[in-house]
Structure formats: C-alpha cells, structure tokens
Image: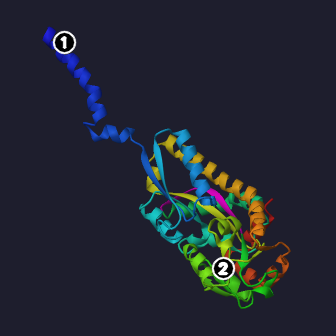
C-alpha cells in the first residue's frame, strides 16, 4: 500500500515537469506567443511606424503574452506592391500599405486617388467610415486580405529643388517623381510636368543626384524619409488624400478565436487613430522645421487653377467611377 501511494505521488510530481518541459509540443504551442510579421515602408518616426507601435502595444495590453509583433519597416521587405503580395500569399501576416499601391490589383481603390476629392482629413475619415470604406474592405476580403482599419498619411504636397510651385504653369517641364499609378501619371502630364514613376525607397538618391526635379508626398512622409535634405521648395497643394490601410492575411485572421479577432480589430483601430493624431499634431511642426532648415514653404497655392487645368480629366474620372458616387463623396458632411 505504501509503495502504491509513493508511485502515485511520483506520477503526480512528474506531471508539471512533463507539461513544463514540453513532452508534447502541443502544450508549448498553446502557451508560447504567436509571432505576427508586420511590414511597412516607413523609417522610424513616420506614421506607419507610429501606427505599428501603437497596434503592438494595444494588442499586448488586450492579450498579454498571446502575440508578438515583429515589425519590419523601411525597405526590409521591398516596396509596397511586394508587401501586398506577401500579405495576400501569407508570406507575412500583416502590413500597413497606402491605397495607391493596391490599384493594379484592386482597381476600385483608385477612386480615393481622384485629385481634390476630399476637403480635409475629417471629411476623408467620414467617407471611409461609410459605404465606400465598407465596400472597399469587402473587395479586399475577396483577395484573401482583411482590412482591419483605415489610418492616415495625410494630403500629398508638391516639393521641388529648382523653383516654387503656386499654380499649374510652374510645373511645366519639371521631372516629377510620382508613384506608379495611372491617375497620378495622367494628372501630372496634364499639368505639364514629366512624370517619372519610382518607388519611395529609390527617391532620396534620385533627388540628390537630380534624376528628378521634384516629388509629391504627405509632409510627414517627406520629413521621415529626409527628403527635406534634397529639396528646397514645399508647395502645400494638398492635391490627393492618402489613407493608410492596416491589413492582415485572411487565413491568419480567420484562424484566430473570436476574442482574438476582436482584440486585433481594436488594436488596429487604436493604431489607425494614432496615425491620424500624429498627422494632425505634427504637420505644423514639420512646416516650422522645414522653414528653420531653410526650405521655402508656399502656402498661397492656387488650388482652383489646378482644378480648372484638370477639368477634362476630372470629368473622365466621373465617367470611370460614377458622377453620382463622386458627388456623394464630395457632399459627405
């Protein structure tokens, strides 16, 4: 009887050791954090990076020890089209990507790139929280990607090295770097520039070596990538609004439990909110920093002249995306 009791005690004492040491890999897998690889193209301090950090912090607060975010920024994983493919195919789990880079695969996204469509960031956020944002999210879902939240990079502005830009005539003959996108290409061709398609990681050297004369980007992207070192004029044209999509591979998302999916969505909303806040709080600081650095910031831009010059093109955009739909976007309050 004594020997049997001791055997039972010995077995009971061994159970914690077996579970802790991982006699079954299943036990360890259930307790170890799951690593989620999150890619973006921003250096530290940019809106992408801030949004990613807040997402990771909030997810850690909601689900302590459940997930570990492996953030890969800058050019680590290639330009945004490569990030899109990586998320879609499951090579990485998540990414923060602008809508511009998705239009070759998701043409419906191009509606957001119509010039002078949004009045301000609040207007854009309300539109994306409504039917348009929901329909675009549903379209991504059919491609194997879940749209977790809409963040923000801000409005794009023209910068140049050789002369200030206050109206369309000032762009005549300038070699302007643009993102690879048909709307951007046609916009700058109509305005008289020579558009040069180029991904962001190539841009600094192209400006420094005067391969191109200028570019256009949101102010914080311009600053975070140190493009203010190789440009002299900043014209606040605010010609196109750039949202930032927090996205996840659909299989990864669907494999999570319901509480985990809810936490991921909540954390993504917090990260997206952080990008909007940093844009709102930091653009004026960025402008002040540019001026202290010796750059010329032009605030008196003739936006109406740009819109008039683009009139026939904007009419073609109405034919492509629907005049009624664009009117509803413009009239959203």
Q: Position of residue 111 (x, y in %)?
A: 67, 71
Mark identifier at residue 220: none
Say if mark 1 contacts mark 2, CB within 8 Å: no
Q: Work out which residue is located at the far top of the displayed protein and give it.
A: 1
Relative side of 16 to 214, left or right: left
Please tell me which of labels 1 and 2 falls first in the chain.
1
Q: Main secondary structure of the magenta part?
A: strand
Q: Quadrant of the N terminus?
A: top left
Q: Position of residue 295 (x, y in %)?
A: 76, 73
Q: Quadrant of the C terminus?
A: bottom right
Q: Position of residue 64 (x, y in %)?
A: 50, 38
Q: Work out which residue is located at the far front of the displayed protein and give it.
A: 293
Taking depth in this image into account, of 143 and 169 the one nearest to the observer is 169
Mark identifier at residue 184: 2
Q: Position of residue 228 (x, y in %)?
A: 68, 72
Residue at 62% of width from left, 58% of height from top?
45
Q: Residues within 10 Å of mark 2 (few under 14, many from 20)?
A: some
Residue at 54% of width from left, 44% of height from top?
59
Q: Secondary structure at mark 2?
A: helix
Q: Magenta segment range? A: 144-155
Taking depth in this image into account, of 231 and 136 the one nearest to the observer is 231
Which residue is the site of mark 1?
5
């Amino acid at each position: 009887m004594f020997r049997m009791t001791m055997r039972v005690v010995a077995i009971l004492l061994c159970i914690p050791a077996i579970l802790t040491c991982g006699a079954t890999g299943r036990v360890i897998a259930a307790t170890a954090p799951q690593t989620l690889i999150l890619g973006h193209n921003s250096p530290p301090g940019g809106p992408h990076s801030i949004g990613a950090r807040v997402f990771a912090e909030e997810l850690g607060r909601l689900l302590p020890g459940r997930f570990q975010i492996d953030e890969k920024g800058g050019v680590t994983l290639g330009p945004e089209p490569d990030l899109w493919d990586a998320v879609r195919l499951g090579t990485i789990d998540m990414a923060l990507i602008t809508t511009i880079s998705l239009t070759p695969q998701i043409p419906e996204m191009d509606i957001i790139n119509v010039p002078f469509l949004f009045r301000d960031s609040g207007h854009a956020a309300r539109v994306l929280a409504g039917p348009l944002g929901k329909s675009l999210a549903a379209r991504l879902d059919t491609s194997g990607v879940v749209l977790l939240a809409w963040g923000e990079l801000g409005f794009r502005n023209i910068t140049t090295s050789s002369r200030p830009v206050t109206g369309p005539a000032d762009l005549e003959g300038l070699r302007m770097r643009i993102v690879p996108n048909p709307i951007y290409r046609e916009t700058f061709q109509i305005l008289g520039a020579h558009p040069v398609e180029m991904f962001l990681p190539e841009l600094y050297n192209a400006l420094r070596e005067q391969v191109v004369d200028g570019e256009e980007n949101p102010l914080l992207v311009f600053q975070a990538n140190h493009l203010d070192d190789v440009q002299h004029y900043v014209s606040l044209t605010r010609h196109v609004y750039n949202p930032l999509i927090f996205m996840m591979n659909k299989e990864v998302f669907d494999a999570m439990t319901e509480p985990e999916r809810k936490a991921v969505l909540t954390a993504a909303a917090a990260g997206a909110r952080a990008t909007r806040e940093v844009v709102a709080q930091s653009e004026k600081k960025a402008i002040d920093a540019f001026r202290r650095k010796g750059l010329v910031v032009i605030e008196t831009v003739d936006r109406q002249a740009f819109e008039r010059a683009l009139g026939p093109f904007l009419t073609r955009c109405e034919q492509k995306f629907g005049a009624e739909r664009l009117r509803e976007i413009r009239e959203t309050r």
